[in-house]
Each structure stands twice: as structure tokens, then as C-alpha cells.
Image: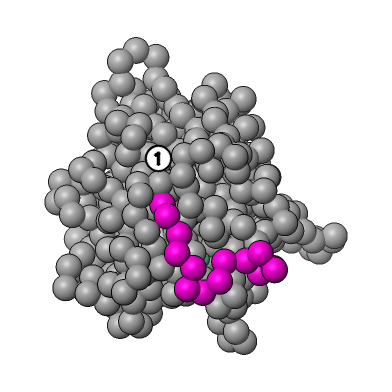
Amino acid sequence: MEFQTPGTSLLDWSGDGLVLGFFQGDQQLSGPLSTLDEKILGGTLAEVIAETEFEGKPGSSTTARVGSKSPIHKLVLVGLGERDKATLDTLRRGAAVGIRLAKQNRCKQVGVAFPLFNDDAALTTQALVEGITLALHQDVRFKSETNGEAKPPERIDLLEVGSQPEAITKAKGICEGVILARELVAAPANLVTPITLAETAQQIAQDYGLELEILEREDCEKLGMGAFLGVAQASELPPKFIHLTYKPVGEPRRKLAIIGKGLTFDSGGLNIKGAGSGIEMMKTDMGGSAAALGSAKAVGQLKPDVEVHFVVAATENMISGHAMHPGDILTASNGKTIEVNNTDAEGRLTLADALVFTEKLGVDAIVDLATLTGACVIALGDDIAGLWSPNDEIAEQFDKASSVSGEKFWRMPLEEKYWDGMKSGVADFKNTGPRPGGAITAALFLKQFVKETPWVHLDIAGPVWADKESGYNNTGATGFGVRTLVNWVTS
Ligand code: BES
Ligand code: MN
Ligand code: ZN
């Protein structure tokens, strides 16, 4: 599939399918669309709009065959809702709806003409390419047969945006990162392991010239990473502590770090996950690391003037004769002692040592992403990630990045009073508190391992996976986080 911005006007375009985006109330044709309808389509567009009572409502669409004698064979109309409420994501989603219909209608050459967001043709182009690429991505790696699916379009011309080669390149780099993240999350735990995550990091390092350091179990022992290694100790697979670094040519404008929770499977440990706990979905517990590695792949291609460290403490949380016992006391690499009152609160233990390691790198800001708590899913549902930060400035940076990426975050409180629930009689603190406010106490736990670097914690347990297709997300892994992270790094 190839994207182009041919720079030709709508009137000169020909192909199988033309996808048009409409705001609500814009069904009275004006500007280039009215000329197109008059000169090329002989009034068909206005007729289709009237006959199908198309009003541009959000999520609405209409398809019509114009005929093979016309330079444009088929029309796909997509409703974008009210102009005043539109965001960049409105266009991204609209493009996804339109391209799915064009594909179903077997269109090979597709033209796309949408209204611009804030008169910004570059941002609009980027959003359209993202929406289309992500909607068309299908993961058939584990199917022995793919039956009768329509093939994706071969050529996509973005019209009425001028020439936008840079926006296309940027969107493609970001989408490659999102797709890598989706594929890592979707693959089961027998195929994505701490070893293969390290290999994926190695491949990114090789392809885009990043530096890579892998700490083996002994290296982690020397650094005193007792919390991470406690989680890793029952697995037959070796833990891998991955540190991938992107350095720009010349002095970096900022130094940033992205940490991702990398539990390639979370059985719960001896506090094993029971029936109805969703244990069969716990291959997704490396969604944070998938977002980190996906961002690394995008950043490696986009080459911003910012240094970025990607850190993953990768392991499984398993059971065996040498598993952590509930009640064990672990010492993290900052010297803090932790009473493990629940072995299923393992993510925060791995992140503790990852945070301590990362702060020593002397970066300007740290973000961690983790499928950390079921409590966050209860609080915010499947579409919204929780965001915690003691630092308003960095929280605002994420707010801005999210408004461009379309990924949703909601800032949650670091309520110090709830720390009372984490007090331990024998160690410095426990790894779990009472059920109420469980996503907040998890965030407070992580905060113990960051001294002074501006830090933001993102709990992505909900949006890492989609139970059904919506907009540019297909059923399954979403690749959540990559688009926001890349926007944050490059802004
Ligand atoms: N990986 C899970 C969190 C999770 C739950 C992610 C559901 C996605 C969907 C995490 O390691 C976990 O087990 N958390 C426990 C914490 C509890 C023991 C305090 C939870 O949320 O139940
Ligand atoms: Mn767990
Ligand atoms: Zn987990």
C-alpha cells in the first residue's frame, strides 16, 4: 500500500473509490466538492446525499457506485459529526471508517478528501495516514488459512492537502511502531518471552543505530535488583533487563526515558490468578514494554534531536518450587525493603528496580507505562489510561501529546493518605494495600523509587486490548501508548 499527496485537484483525480469526509450540516455542497459534482459526477454526489438522507452524523456513512465510465467509480461518504467538536482524532477515525468501506468495495486506487483540521494540512495528512494504516493492519500470523478477505487498496491519494511527503513519512514511522507494539502484545507467551523481547530490542538497535545494553540475571544481582529478581525467580526463562538508547547527532535538546512493564506472562505467582481472573489474557502484561519498543522503532526512524532511553525489566511471573512465597521480604536496588503480601502485584516490583536504574541515567523526565492494575480498568474502563504525576508540567506535556495522538488519559490523584494502607510491620512497606483505590496505591508504590526526576506513571491495563473493532483499532492489541509517546518525545 502506497500513500501519495499528488497535489492534483479533486477535478483531475481518477480511481476506483473516492472517500469524502463531511461535517454535520455540510451536505450542501460548496467549494471543490460542488465543482466536482457539477463537472465530473453529473450531480450524482448531491443525489446520493439526498437519497440516503446523509447528514454527516458521527459514525454514519454511505457508499454509492457512480459507474466505470466516470473517472471516479465509487463514492464513500463518511460523517464526521459537528465541526465545532472535531479533533484530530475525528479525522483519524473517519479515515478508518472510510478506508474499511473502500476495502470492502474492492477499491484498488483510493482518493481521500477530508476537511482540514485547524487549516493544518500537515497534521491532517498525518492523522489520515495513521487512521488508514492502523485500520488496515491485520494480524494473520497465527492463522493457517485466511479465507476470502478483501485485499487492501494498493494506492491511496490524499487530496486537497498539497504536497506532504514529510507528514506521510512521520505517520508511517509512528504506525510501524504501533504495529510492532500490537504484534508483540497479540503474540502469546510461548512466542514472546523475555529472550525474544531482548531480541526485538537488538533488531531495533541494529536497524536504526541505537545503543543496546542487556543486563543478565548476574548483572542485575550485582546492582541489587532484588525486587525484579524476586518476580523472576520461578520462571524457567532467564530475565532480561533491556536498556536501549537513541542518541541524536549533536547535543540533545532533552534527555528522556520511557520504561515499560515487561511481564511476558503473569500467572499471579503463588497468589495464582483464579477462574474468571482473565489469566488467559496475561500475555498482554508486557503491553508497556511493547509501547516502549514500538516507540523506539518509531524514534529510530524519525530521528528527533532528543536523547531517549527505553528500559524494560522483562520476565515472567510464574510458580515453581523456588517461587517467591507470599510474605517474602525483598530488597530493591535503592535499599528499600518490601514485604510481598501478594505475589500478583508483581509489575510494581519489576518497575521499582527499573525506576531506580533509570533515574541514575540523569534524564530530564521519566515516563513508565504498565498494565499495572485491574483497579484502573474498573475506574476508567477500556478506553482510558490512568495518569499519575507529582509534576504538573510533565502532566501537561502528556495532555498536549494526547490531544494530538487521540489516545485518552485521565489524571488521577497521588493521595498520600492512602499510603497508610501500604505500611508493613516487618519491612519498609508492603507491595499491596486494601482493594479500594488499588490503582492509586500502586502509583504511590512506584513513587517510592523516584527521588527527584519529573516522572509520570501511565496505567494502560484497559486500553492495551480492544474487545471489539472501533475506528482504527481492530479487535485485539491496540498498540496503545506509542502515538502519545512519540508525540511527547518529538514535541
Ligand atoms: N497484570 C495485572 C493487572 C491487570 C489486570 C492487567 C487485568 C490487565 C487486566 C497485575 O499484575 C495484577 O495482577 N494486579 C493485581 C494487583 C492486586 C494483587 C493488588 C490486580 O489488579 O488485581
Ligand atoms: Mn499480577
Ligand atoms: Zn501483571
What residue does disc 1 label? 357
> Is residue 89 part of the magenta span, yes or no?
no
Residue 374 is situated, as x and y percent measured from the top left of the image, at 43, 75
Left or right position of 107 against 366 = right
> Is residue 324 part of the magenta span, yes or no?
yes
Which quarter of the rendered picture does the C terminus lie within?
top left
The residue most toward the right is 144
Q: Residue at x 38, y 73 (%)?
A: 432
Count neighbours of disc 1 (C-alpha within 10 A) and say few if under 14, some if 14 to 19, many if 20 or more: some
User: Residue 87 is drawn in which quadrant?
Assistant: bottom left
> Can see residue 251?
yes
> Can see residue 408?
no
Left or right position of 406 against 416 = right
Residue 157 is situated, as x and y percent measured from the top left of the image, at 51, 38
Magenta: main secondary structure equals: loop
Which quarter of the rendered picture does the N terminus lie within?
top right
The residue most toward the bottom is 275
Question: Which amino acid, mark 1?
Answer: Phe
Q: Which residue is drawn at 23% across and 41% down?
A: 453
Q: Which residue is drawn at 67% across and 48% down?
A: 238
Residue nearer the viewer, 291 or 86: 291
Secondary structure under tag 1 reads: helix
Residue 370 is situated, as x and y percent measured from the top left of the image, at 43, 58
Q: Give the range drawn in magenta.
A: 319-332
